[in-house]
Image (cartoon, rainbow, N blue to C red):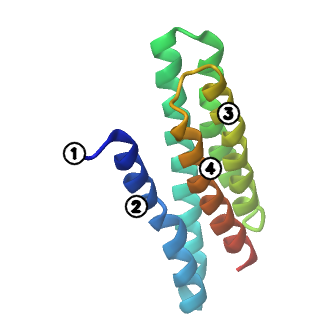
Amino acid sequence: MVTARRSAQLAGVAGLIPFLAPLGVAWGHPPWAAAALEVQAIYAAVILSFLGGIYWGLALAREAGRWFWISVLPSLWGWAALLLPDAVVPFSLAAGFALMFVIDRAARQRGWVESWFPRLRLGLGVTAIVSLALAGLA
């Protein structure tokens, strides 16, 4: 039987493919570089929204009004990042993922998520941040 933790790990790793694949395209096929990196940035903004959705659900389950506001920050951050000049988009999105560490830690301190969740998010988040930083340097 696959545990929820193991399923989350496997799904999380699969979710890294759209962060990593565009780097290979950008470096291996320069004519497609801009399109590949744009797709990566859009995916990063979508994932920030997804992560915010986790906290919307937790706020809903606990009727924690302030957390509804916290939960929309990642979505707004991702949207705003996509409006910035191309050269700063990946770095702004990477900063959004760094912000998620603060939110993850606060949720763990409140006992809202299991202890493994922030550790999982750390590994996935660092990979997203590094891939976005590499995209910004490409």
Q: Which residue appears at 57% of the width and 77% of the height?
A: 23
Residue on which the image places disc 1? 1
Res 68 quadrant in image? top right
Residue 114's x, y, as percent?
Answer: 51, 31
Q: Nearer the viewer, mark 1 or mark 2?
A: 1
- Earlier in the chain: of badge 3 and badge 2, it is 2
- Earlier in the chain: of badge 1 and badge 4, it is 1
Instruction: Inspect this view and state whether residue 33 appears.
Output: yes
Label at residue 122: 4
- Earlier in the chain: of badge 3 and badge 1, it is 1
Q: Amino acid at mark 3?
A: Arg
Label 1 to label 4: alpha-carbon separation: 25 Å
Q: Which residue appears at 38% of the width and 53% of the height?
A: 11
Label 4 to label 3: alpha-carbon separation: 10 Å
Local SS, label 2: helix
Local SS, label 1: loop
Res 128 quadrant in image? bottom right
Residue on which the image places disc 3? 105
Residue on which the image places disc 2? 14
Q: Amino acid at mark 4?
A: Leu
